[in-house]
Amino acid sequence: MTDIKNSKLTDSAAAGTEIEQKLQASDSAGQPYVELRHINKSFGDFKASDDVSFTVGKGSLVGLLGPSGSGKTTILRILAGLETADSGEIYINGKLVNNIPANKRGIGFVFQSYALFRYMTVFDNIAFGLRTKKAPKDEIKEKVNSLIDLVGLTGLNKRYPNQLSGGQRQRVAFARALATEPSLLLLDEPFAAIDAKVRQELRSWLKDLIQRVGITSIFVTHDQSEAIEVADQIIITNHGHVERSGSPIEIYSNPESSFVTKFIGQPTIIDNPGIFNGFSKIRESRSTAVLRPEFISVTKLNEPFRYNITSETGIVEKSFFRGGDFELKVRVHDQLLTVNRPITQERIVPGEEVRIFIRSLYLLDGDKAVTVLNDSLTAAESTYVI
Amino acid sequence: MSKNTKGVIPGFGISFGISVSILSLIVIIPLCSLIVFSSQLSISDFWEIVTRPRVIASYKVSLVTSFTASVINAVMGLIMAWVLVRYKFPGKRILDGMIELPFALPTAVAGISLAHLTVSEGPVGALFAKFGIDIAYTNIGITVAMVFIGIPFVVRSIQPVLEQVENEYEEAAFIMGAGRFETFYRVVLPEIRPALIAGFTMAFARCLGEYGSVVFIAGNKPYETEIAPLMIMGELQEFDYPAATSVALTMLVMAFVILFINAVFQSRASAIISGIR
């Protein structure tokens, strides 16, 4: 921490790479950089954190994903020192930080509402942390200007936050959090306050910038597409505990737990999956399963289809245009399935009878979820594929 | 304000008409009459009246005591507003309601009771008399009365603004390494500064014009504890209306200057907040 503080940025253009080099120099590869051990936190009767443990590698970009009220923001605030855990340990860079107050922890925090100081210019906002550290004036000026260039706000130094667009404010908040060269960057719903179009652009901008700066970052989101797109590692929380942790691809393609299966992707929950053709091996009639649109193909009755025996027919009830494709709601065995049909294929209209082929599904078994393939796609002897 | 945009509740014409009429009837016409009365005097006479040593002394007393009282009110009012907004405690509602009492009480009642308390034989006055401090019939007494009548202005201007200052501002400052004092001074204070200045100037203007509660405690010694409104009262009792209105006009100008400075500050602050520059 101290060696980072003492060094200063010399050239604004080289700002990103210089920080990158600095952080890589002190890199201790393989070891967890941030570690939470058995964190518990209650607000009255409400258990916000229930035995939360996870580790974050140095330089990685982690997304804390969960439904609202699942305790993800509490974890972030405990990490920052804004809340105190009832029990458990927090380690940052190998050091126990439980008793270090937030203003000494050296963490950058981007608030959901950005919390930019309204009566300060962009420059003064970013300079805030450096001024509290009593950094020399010319060093502050140099540093802040290089950060303003880094986040692409050149020329807006003298603007006030309310003269900026939502996306620009986020960039200021980001630069402000980075100014003191924190060891860890925390972001609470960083894109929630931004309109959809700019959000898309800022996601890739932020990911790119965090990678360039090389700072270990944890962000909170309730939007799975955001987590999947931005994070290197996703930690899914539910009812205050960590449900699952892994890379976006791992979690998406192998959700493992029942909760994650019902949370990730675009799930349709069906009852008694055994009645669907190709899944007669599922004997338990009270079981439930989760389907995703990408597991199902839909064809017109007159279109040739390979697996006729293990397919179903259903009636299209609704059709929603989603841009690239149509989202169809098809009723099969009195259950409503969601399937996608590309716009380039022949149009299917509501009321039409169609052929539905379910390639696979996630069978829920208590807390677990297992993949079950359609009979047509498996060899006769192996029924369950995990 | 444009006629082309229709609001949910229409009637710009009639409501604007009523506003202007009321403003004219109760504010502009009486103020103009001041100028009309004063203009019966020549400029040199006017100048002589408003610069008599006794009148000058009364301006000084009024300005100094009003300013002191408003500074005290600004500090105390800020603390009271802070307590009322930030903390939960039993009796909070009652305390909140008591802030307005100085508005509701007839000022003469306040003046009499304050004078009774602070004379050297009174319960509070006796306490200070031991240290050789006289409150009643001195400028201190005038200031005490003014603090009493001015406090609601400050509390009530800061309170709603402070409620809007989000906890996140303080947390953001804290995470960036700021201590308590620095967080307050650099983050919270700028947010409430416009309201604080507004409360200060309103209290100041009100104190300048206060008569009822002050005269009982002031003692009204010429050149020492005579306030400017008392000079106006004196002229009126001698039926010298032009002289009374001349002094009144001078005070009006003072009050106007104070409120104008406030207005300039407020418009600058709101320009920053609204993002229009």
Image (spheres, coloured by chain):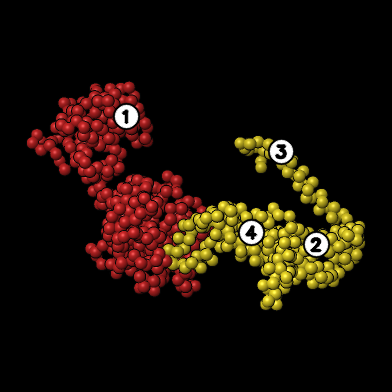
Chain colours: A red, B yellow
Residue placed most toward the observer, B122 or B221? B122
The reply to whether label 1 and label 3 mark residues of one chain is: no
Please, is residue A212 above or below residue B129 in the view? above
For the residue marked with disc 4, what is the amino acid?
Val
Q: For the residues marked 1 and 4, what is the alpha-carbon distance in whole angstroms?
A: 62 Å
Residue at horizontal 36%, vertical 50%?
A46
Q: Give the left or right position of residue A311, taking residue B12 as reference.
A: left
| Among the two numbered marks 3 and 4 on one chain, the one whose residue lies closer to the N terminus | 3
Q: For the residues marked 1 and 3, what is the alpha-carbon distance in whole angstroms?
A: 55 Å
- Asked if marks 4 and 2 touch (Cβ < 8 Å), the reply is no
Residue placed most toward the observer, A157 or A256? A256
Q: Quick one: SS at disc 3?
A: helix
Residue B119 percent coordinates (x, y): 73, 69
| Among the two numbered marks 3 and 2 on one chain, the one whose residue lies closer to the N terminus | 3
Mark 3 lies on residue: B13
Q: Give the left or right position of residue A155, taking residue B62 as reference.
A: left
- Asked if marks 1 and 2 touch (Cβ < 8 Å), the reply is no
Mark 4 lies on residue: B154
For the residue marked with disc 3, what is the amino acid?
Gly
For the residue marked with disc 2, what is the amino acid?
Pro
Q: Which mark is residue A295?
A: none
Q: Quick one: SS at disc 4?
A: helix
Q: Which mark is residue A329?
A: 1
Q: Quick one: SS at disc 1?
A: strand
Residue at horizontal 39%, vertical 47%?
A200
Mark 1 or 4: the one toward you: 4
| Among the two numbered marks 4 and 2 on one chain, the one whose residue lies closer to the N terminus | 4
The reply to whether label 1 and label 4 mark residues of one chain is: no
